[in-house]
Image (cartoon, rainbow, N blue to C red):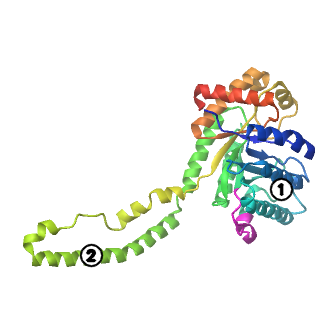
């Protein structure tokens, strides 16, 4: 069985998108796409890419385009000006989402702070979007995503990253539908980070104590009229049975569960579970090659931690990647391929790697 994955697209120009990339993803039906935001001033072009991608998706295809928004790359004069630009762009993307009757693919927006921290970061941006009447008024709502790096080797930095993730998910509760993991090679740290993430999602899915108390009080109030009606009916039946003792045995009604406890238990079944809305989790995947290793040795990506063993050879990098994929499988994480795959040879190498992981229990 094929392993699902998402794919980042790297377009050098409009001609490159239309002549090389769109025919390739259409031929292979690669409809789950991420568009990274790596430079200043490229958001208008990315929005055009979104429209071009959605235009080639056939009706009924399971498609999603996630556009990345780097707050650092799009920072304006101040935090207020930067948020105004983000809000405007999010509403533009929301307007694209309203064209669902024309384009079948769904859209989402991944917020990343970037390497340079400013007064407005992804946490503050989420808080402001959650309080924005304009953004909250989008119909349908625009799904948001956040990033998490589980690979920091420094314990204090890792704890800070976890604290920030908690803040982001709390600020974006009801808005954030996905968490994207940074790339790295340490499978053990990844496993620890995913255990933390799952525990955090469980914690946020549970109602707060005051919310739970309010729900219980409301349930009790709703149950009281029903209980009184049931009691009155029971008294009437008892009076009838006392008047006709010979028929008492066959007229006794079958017992039914009653009271607030039983009703609350029934109400907290599938409907409550469906309302949990746990975010999906996607994990970065690098396709090892000599070119990638050379780049990561001499110009490593910010926040990407790769071991010396990983950087030593393509074979060692592939072995580390398989270990990462096995951790993804255990936690239900869908890979996001962050190295360029825009040709037959690259796609074949990716499929070979995923197939090797599946043979070791990934599928």
Instruction: Name the image quarter holding the C terminus.
Output: top right
Task: Choose the circle earlier in sequence order: 2 or 1.
Answer: 1
**Residue drawn at point x = 71 percent, y = 63 percent:** 127
Q: Is residue 86 above or below residue 27?
A: below
Note whether 358 is above or below 106 in the view shown.
Answer: above
Q: Is residue 78 visible?
A: yes
Magenta residues (range): 128-143
Residue matched to label 1: 118
Kindly give the residue lying farthest to the left in the view shown.
246
Q: Residue at x 68, y 56 (%)?
A: 168
Measured as percent of width and height from the top left, residue 166 is found at: 65, 53
Residue 307 appearing in the image: no
Question: In the picture, residue 355 is in which quadrant?
Answer: top right
**Closer to viewer: mark 2 or mark 1:** 2
Tell me the distance, in whole angstroms, between the alpha carbons under discs 2 and 1: 64 Å
Q: Which mark is residue 298?
A: none
Residue 145 location, x and y as percent? 71, 53
Q: Could you tell whether 263 is left or right of 357 in the image?
A: left
Identify the residue at the far front of this view. Answer: 59
User: Residue 55 appears at what percent x and percent y?
Assistant: 80, 52
Residue 2, picture quadrant: top right
Give neighbour class at mark 2: few <14, some 14-19, many 20+ (Cα, 10 Å).
few
**Is 343 included in the stretch rendered in magenta?**
no
Q: Which residue is mark 2?
A: 231
Quadrant assignment for the N terminus: top right
Dot 1 surroundings within 10 Å: few (below 14), some, or many (20 or more)?
some
């Amino acid at each position: 069985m094929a392993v699902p994955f998402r794919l980042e697209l790297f377009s050098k120009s409009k001609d490159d998108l239309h002549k090389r990339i769109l025919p390739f993803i259409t031929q292979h039906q690669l409809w789950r796409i991420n568009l990274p935001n790596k430079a200043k001033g490229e958001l208008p072009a990315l929005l055009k890419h979104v429209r071009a991608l959605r235009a080639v998706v056939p009706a009924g295809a399971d498609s999603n385009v996630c556009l990345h928004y780097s707050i650092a790359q799009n920072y304006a004069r101040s935090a207020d000006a930067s948020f105004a630009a983000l809000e405007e762009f999010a509403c533009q993307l929301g307007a694209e989402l309203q064209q669902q009757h024309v384009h079948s693919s769904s859209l989402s927006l991944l917020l990343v702070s970037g390497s340079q921290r400013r007064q407005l970061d992804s946490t503050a941006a989420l808080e402001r979007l959650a309080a924005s009447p304009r953004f909250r008024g989008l119909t349908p709502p625009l799904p948001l995503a956040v990033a998490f790096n589980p690979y920091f080797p420094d314990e204090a930095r890792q704890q800070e990253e976890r604290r920030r993730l908690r803040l982001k998910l709390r600020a974006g509760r009801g808005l954030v539908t996905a968490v994207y993991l940074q790339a790295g090679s340490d499978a053990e740290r990844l496993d620890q980070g995913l255990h933390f993430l799952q525990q955090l999602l469980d914690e946020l899915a549970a109602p707060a104590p005051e919310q739970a108390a309010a729900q219980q009080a409301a349930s009790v109030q709703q149950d009281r009229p029903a209980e009184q009606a049931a009691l009155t009916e029971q008294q009437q039946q008892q009076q009838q049975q006392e008047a006709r003792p010979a028929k008492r045995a066959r007229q006794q009604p079958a017992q039914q569960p009653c009271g607030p406890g039983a009703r609350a238990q029934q109400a907290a079944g599938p409907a409550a579970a469906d309302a949990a809305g746990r975010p999906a989790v996607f994990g970065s995947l690098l396709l090892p090659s000599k070119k990638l290793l050379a780049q990561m040795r001499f110009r490593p990506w910010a926040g990407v931690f790769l071991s010396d063993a990983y950087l030593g050879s393509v074979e060692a990098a592939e072995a580390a990647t398989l270990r990462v994929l096995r951790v993804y499988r255990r936690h239900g994480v869908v890979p996001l391929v962050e190295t360029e795959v825009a040709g037959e040879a690259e796609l074949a190498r990716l499929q070979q790697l995923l197939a090797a992981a599946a043979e070791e229990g990934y599928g």
